[in-house]
């Protein structure tokens, strides 16, 4: 078991929009969708029915056709990867949530006066073409059933998102208080209580951890969890114990979903640099919280339902 959380950088922006996952054999231009052929309903007159509304976001309607196109892109991407989605209603709701969040991002950008010019979008496209070649880029657009205008709006949203995320990312510190701690993890409370008695009798913590801890990632180092800030462990109960004690203090038996722990706090550092991977996790959490705040403060009226 690894208690210390390890997260990479990938997907900070993808937490706001779907990450593309399929396409031609060569690498696709950077973007956030994997569309397939959209299916559109037509009226008897042959025109696309755009009057039906899927959801209204702060008074702004999103058409059913827009939702159907995005759903088709998602389904095509899953099919291209050989995935069979069991929870149909779940992924349909996920696609609709994507459109809602995209609209919330556009509205927030408008409120803050953030504008992405056509020239900025052109620069992004030119960069992609320079990296992949014009023929490949054009083929990618066609293969993924985008119009030029649709793809430009995807890029515009990406750039808007980057601008909006700037303050969120800057608010996550690069240094924070850390604690250095170690623990012993066992499967039963009775065993933990027995080890605690032995510790209180003067037996060595590291030796007992090596002999009895079922956390294979730390047992060989005497239960050492290393340095971590708040939010740095997978087990909040252990983290809380480590931060709440004085150096040299040993906790009582602590129950968690993993089993039963005994925690010793070793030392504190009031302003230690946060490890790269840990900071990425903190950034991810900050963005997730920010996304939720956007939704919590919004008037969202969903007009479509999904059958499971």
Image: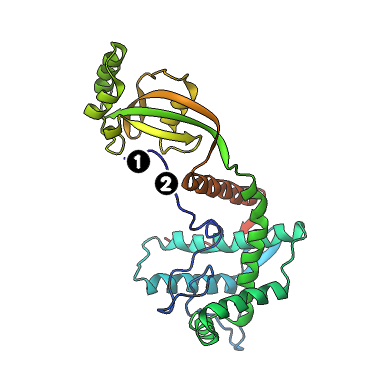
Q: CA distance from mark 2 to mark 1?
A: 9 Å
Q: Nearer the viewer, residue 248 or 75?
A: 248
Q: Position of residue 189 (x, y in %)?
A: 28, 23
Percent x, y of residue 307 = 45, 62
Within 10 angstroms of label 1, few (less than 14), some, or many (20 or more) residues? few
Q: Position of residue 248 (x, y in %)?
A: 42, 18
Disc 1 target residue: 2
- Quadrant holding the C terminus: bottom left
Kindly give the residue lying farthest to the top in the view shown.
201
Residue 51 seen by the camera: no
| Residue under pointer 2 | 6
For the N terminus, the quadrant is top left
Question: Between 302 and 18, which is closer to the camera in this rendering?
Answer: 18
Q: Is residue 214 above or below residue 37?
A: above
Look at the numbered disc 2 and give the secondary structure of its residue: loop
Classify mark 1: helix, strand or loop: loop
Give the residue displayed 43% in from the left and 79% down from the top: 24
Q: Is residue 9 left or right of residue 261?
A: right
Say whether residue 122 is left or right of residue 279.
right
Answer yes or no: is residue 66 visible: yes
């Amino acid at each position: 078991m690894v208690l210390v959380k390890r997260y990479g950088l990938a997907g900070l922006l993808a937490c706001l929009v779907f990450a593309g996952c399929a396409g031609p054999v060569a690498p696709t231009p950077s973007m956030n969708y994997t569309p397939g052929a959209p299916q559109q309903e037509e009226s008897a007159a042959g025109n696309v029915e755009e009057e039906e509304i899927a959801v209204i976001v702060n008074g702004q309607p999103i058409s059913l056709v827009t939702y159907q196109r995005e759903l088709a892109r998602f389904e095509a991407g899953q099919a291209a990867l050989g995935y069979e989605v069991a929870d149909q209603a779940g992924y349909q709701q996920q696609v609709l949530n994507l459109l809602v969040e995209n609209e919330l991002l556009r509205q927030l950008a408008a409120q803050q006066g953030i504008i992405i010019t056509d020239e900025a979008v052109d620069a992004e496209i030119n960069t992609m073409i320079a990296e992949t070649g014009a023929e490949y880029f054009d083929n990618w657009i066609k293969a993924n059933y985008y119009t030029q205008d649709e793809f430009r709006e995807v890029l515009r949203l990406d750039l808007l998102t980057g601008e909006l995320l700037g303050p969120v990312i800057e608010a996550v510190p690069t240094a924070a208080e850390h604690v250095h701690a170690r623990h012993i993890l066992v499967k039963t409370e009775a065993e933990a209580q027995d080890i605690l008695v032995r510790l209180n009798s003067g037996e060595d913590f590291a030796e007992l951890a090596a002999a009895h801890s079922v956390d294979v990632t730390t047992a060989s180092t005497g239960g050492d969890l290393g340095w971590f800030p708040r939010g740095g462990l997978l087990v909040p109960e252990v983290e809380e114990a480590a931060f709440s004690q004085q150096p040299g203090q040993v906790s009582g038996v602590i129950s968690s979903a993993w089993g039963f722990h005994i925690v010793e706090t070793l030392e504190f550092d009031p302003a230690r640099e946060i490890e790269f991977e840990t900071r990425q996790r903190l950034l991810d959490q900050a963005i997730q919280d920010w996304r939720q705040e956007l939704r919590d403060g919004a008037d969202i009226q969903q007009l479509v339902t999904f059958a499971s």
